[in-house]
Image (spheres, helix red, strand yellow):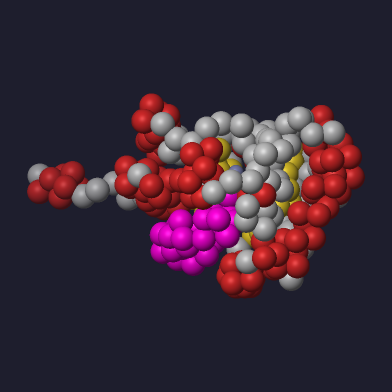
Amino acid sequence: MTDSNDRASQAPPVRRLPDRRLIVSIHDVSPAFADPIERLAETIGAILGGPRFAMLVVPDHWGAAPLDRAPAFARRLRGWADAGVEMFLHGWFHRDTSAHAGAAAAIKARYMTAGEGEFLGLSADEAEDRMRRGRDLVEDAIERPVAGFIAPAWLYGAGAHQALKACDFALAEDHFRVWQPASGAVVAKGPVVTWASRSTARTASSLAVAAAARALPDWLPTLRVAVHPGDVTKESLMKSIDRTIRSLSARRTVGRYADLLPEGGRAS
Ligand SMILES: [Zn+2]
């Protein structure tokens, strides 16, 4: 009977599912958040064995952090891109307002509020203009094409959808799907696991969702995980992020967005 005792004392082996994919991304990559971005990249890179994640770059966060006036950060971005990080354009200002000036403290206070859906209410012309200018700015920094466009807060209005097609981005995503704007073809479905740092209640519910995602049966072929600079302000969130990415990457193949494109698609 020692045989069964031995077996019982062993932890069940983790079964890696080769056809199940995990894609991790860091949102709101901007010189405004250079330190938190650095910490997130380090933490996640250590878990995944390298910079095997995507970054969503904001060209001028709240009109206070233009990428083309932050050469050191732009070089850092280029280094990550060289190391294989997929770079997405993530809005222009990120925030849905025209009043962007303000001291650092005011910016911090405003970041604690909602209203980050910059591309929800834009006309097609305005959306296209920001997409084209934003893409130029990010591509100047990384010296290669962006992997796609992802709207702030995953919110797209009709104008944004129209502009996405006109700009011919390879990929876009919202909370529930990843698609190819040119054809409208959906290449992955399923919610994004993400965390909220803005309020105690939202933090608590995001911790519960992450725990549920870790315990979830592996039905979804692709599971996306997204982290934000604000997550580093709460140790409970950083712990949950660590556990969640560790657990999911043990069971799933760590993939790239480009893997979702038919025939490998456009590698970035
Ligand atoms: Zn964002």
Indicate left or right for 214 with 109 as reference. left
Indicate left or right for 209 with 169 as reference. left
> In which quadrant of this rendering is ligand 1 seen?
top right
The answer to whether residue 213 is above or below residue 31 is above
Residue 36 seen in render: yes
Q: Is residue 217 magenta?
A: no
- Tell me residue 135's x, y (percent): 77, 56
On-image quarter of the C terminus? bottom right
The answer to whether residue 251 is above or below residue 85 is above
Indicate left or right for 142 with 45 as reference. right
Residue 41 seen in render: no
Q: Say which residue appears at 29% left-offset and 46% top-offset.
A: 12
Q: Say which residue appears at 80% left-offset and 47% top-offset.
A: 130
The answer to whether residue 49 is above or below residue 205 is below
Residue in front for this viewpoint, 71 or 166: 71
- Tell me residue 50's x, y (percent): 49, 67
Q: Magenta part of the protein: which range?
A: 24-53
Q: Say which residue appears at 64% left-offset and 46% top-offset.
A: 101
